[in-house]
Amino acid sequence: MIIALNNKCNLDKEEFINYQQELANIRTNHQLILCPSSLHIANFNLVNCDLGSQNVSKEETGAHTGEISASQLKSFLVKYCIVGHSERRQELKETSQDINQKIKQLLKYEIIPILCIGETESERELEKTMPVLEEELLLATKDLTKEQKDKIIIAYEPIWSIGTGKIPTIEQIEEVFTKIKSIFPDNKVLYGGSANEKNIDTLHKCQKIDGYLLGGLSLKVSELKIFLKKLEN
Ligand code: 13P
C-alpha cells in the first residue's frame, strides 16, 4: 500500500529534525511518502520514505513571488506532489483549472501528482457526491493522455472527514471507490480523512483502498507505527 504523510503547516526546524529521526526507525513493507512543509524539503534525509511536496506552482518559472516550481522540486529529488487539497481549494481559492495546470507541470518534470478530490458535508447530504467527484476528476485531468492520466495517484478525501474524527461508512467508501475506478481503472486510489490507528481495522475491510493519505496521524509517529503494523495483518 501507499502511505502518504501530509504534515501540512506543522513542525519547526528542530521539531522536524527530531521527527525525521523517529520516522527513520519505521520498518514497513508499505511505501511511505513524506510530504513535509516546503521549508524542510532541502533537509529530507530518510531512506525508508520517498519525498513529496504539498504544493507546486502552476507556472514554469519566473516572476511568481512565493511560488515553488516543478523544476525546483525536481532538483531537490521530489518524486510526488499533492495537488487539489481541499484546504488549498477553500483557503487559497485554487480552481480546477489551476490544478490541471499544476498536474501538467508536475508530469512535465516526472513528478507524480497525488490528486485530492472530495465532497463537502452539504454536497453529500444533497446526494451530489458522485457528480462533484466526477467533475473534479475530469477538470483536473483535462487534455491529458491516457498514459499521463495513469501516472496520477488519486486521493479521496471527504472534506467533512478531514480533521473531524468522522469517517465514511465502508459502504460509502466502496461506492465512491467503485465510481472512481470505473473512470480511472488503472490508477491507485488512496483514502484520506481522520484515518488513524483506531479506525484502520474498519477502513482496511474495504479491499478497493490502495493506501492512505494521513494528516494528523503523520505527526504522531508512535500511533503511526501501530497503524502500519495493523495494515500488515
Ligand atoms: P487528517 O488525517 O488530519 O484528517 O487529514 C487528512 C488530510 O487532509 C490529508 O491530506
Image (cartoon, rainbow, N blue to C red):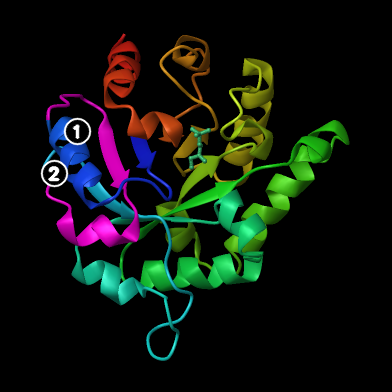
Q: Quadrant of residue 22?
A: top left
Any atom of ligand 1 within 8 Å of the CB at mark 2? no
Q: Which mark is residue 81?
A: none
Crowd rating for badge 2 (residues with CA inside 10 Å; few <14, some 14–19, many 20+): some
Any atom of ligand 1 within 8 Å of the CB at mark 1? no
**Amino acid at dot 1:** Leu
Q: Which mark is residue 46?
A: 2
- The residue nearer to you, when weighing 176 against 91, is 91
Q: Quadrant of residue 163?
A: top right
Quadrant in the picture for the N terminus: top left
Residue 90 in percent (x, y) is at: 66, 56
Q: Secondary structure at mark 1?
A: helix
On screen, residue 156 versus residue 64, left or right, reads: right
Residue 149 in percent (x, y) is at: 48, 58
Rendered residue at 20%/71% (across/down): 75
Residue 170 in percent (x, y) is at: 62, 17
Rendered residue at 61%/28% (across/down): 164
Q: CA distance from mark 1 to mark 2?
A: 8 Å
Rendered residue at 53%/27% (across/down): 194
- The residue nearer to you, when weighing 175 against 4, is 4
Crowd rating for badge 1 (residues with CA inside 10 Å; few <14, some 14–19, many 20+): many
Disc 1 to disc 2: CB gap under 8 Å: yes
Q: Secondary structure at mark 2?
A: loop
Quadrant in the picture for the C terminus: top left
Q: Identify the residue position indicated by label 1 in the image.
A: 23
> Magenta segment, which residues?
25-46
Rendered residue at 61%/64% (across/down): 92
Q: Residue furthest right?
A: 126
Determine whether 46 is above or below 42 in the image. Answer: above
**Amino acid at dot 2:** Leu
State which tag comes first along the sequence, 1 or 2. 1
